Image (cartoon, rainbow, N blue to C red):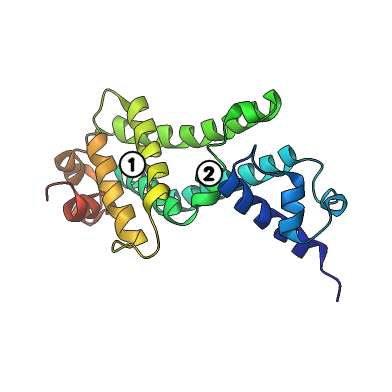
Amino acid sequence: MATDKSDMSLKVREAAVELFSRQGYDGTSMRDIAKRSNISVANLYNYTDSKETLFWTLMKAAVEDLMHEQREALSHETCSAARFVVFAYTHAKHHTTHAREVVRLGNTPMESLSPDRADKVRAVRDEYEGMFRAVIGEGLKDDFLKTDHYVLANRAILQMGVGISLWFHPEEVLTSESVANVYAAFAMAIVGYDSDAHDRTCAAGTECVAATTWMKWAPGR
């Protein structure tokens, strides 16, 4: 029975993700991807015009998937502190399950790509960083978060999430959810979460996800 083209396209993408994440962009050839996909090199060009295009497609899709998860999580929260918490939580949890796509693809050296593609990768990364910066800004405006270094805090928290993917494994004693919860509490500490100001002002008070996360997972509690 013939293989459906969409199935083969998915197979090519999976092969490319695995090889790029394991061997690196420069260490992976189109021949490698074709062999892993069990097709000829000539046939591989029916699914992409170049290795760089395939990489860019995968990289863009990975970050867009993460941004979609973030928008969905944020859509359920109105409190700015809660929005910060769910963003940090989602960022961390995603990195426990998508190490290959987000981290190893996302950290491919820019010099491996053409200037145009490199600029596009930077733009996607910047868009995601901008999403979080806006969330932090909301919390600062409401006086729930208090830091003079929100740009550095933003980058530090995002980079901490990347680090999770380097050590987390499904067999860890800590679950994906517990890691994400602790990480969110650490992130709250970094931006100077003011629990008193929040609990006095937030309509949900101590029932807000920000308050419950802080009370249960905050460092030293």
Question: Where is 173 relative to 200, above or below?
Answer: below
Mark 2 lies on residue = 104
Which picture quadrant has residue 194?
top left
Question: Where is 130 relative to 182, above or below?
Answer: above
Residue at 24 percent of width and 46 percent of height: 202
Residue at 37 percent of width and 26 percent of height: 151
In this rendering, would 157 be left or right of 11? left
Residue at 72 percent of width and 50 percent of height: 32
Q: Residue furthest bottom?
A: 1
Question: Where is 51 relative to 148, above or below?
Answer: below
Depth order, front residue of 196/96: 96
Which picture quadrant has residue 4?
bottom right
Residue at 47 percent of width and 32 percent of height: 130
Q: Are marks 2 and 1 in contact (CB under 8 Å)?
A: no
Q: Quadrant of the N terminus?
A: bottom right
> Which of label 2 and label 1 is nearer to you?
2
Q: Amino acid at mark 2?
A: Arg
- Decide if residue 77 is in sight here: no
Q: Where does the image place residue 220, in percent across and percent down from the top left?
A: 12, 47
Depth order, front residue of 132/180: 180
In this rendering, would 198 be left or right of 120? left
Q: Residue furthest left?
A: 221
- Decide if residue 183 is in sight here: yes
Dot 1 falls on a residue whose secondary structure is helix
Q: Which label belongs to residue 169? A: none
Mark 1 lies on residue = 80
Q: Amino acid at mark 1?
A: Ser
**Mark 1 packing: few (<14 Cα in 10 Å), some, or many (20+)?**
many
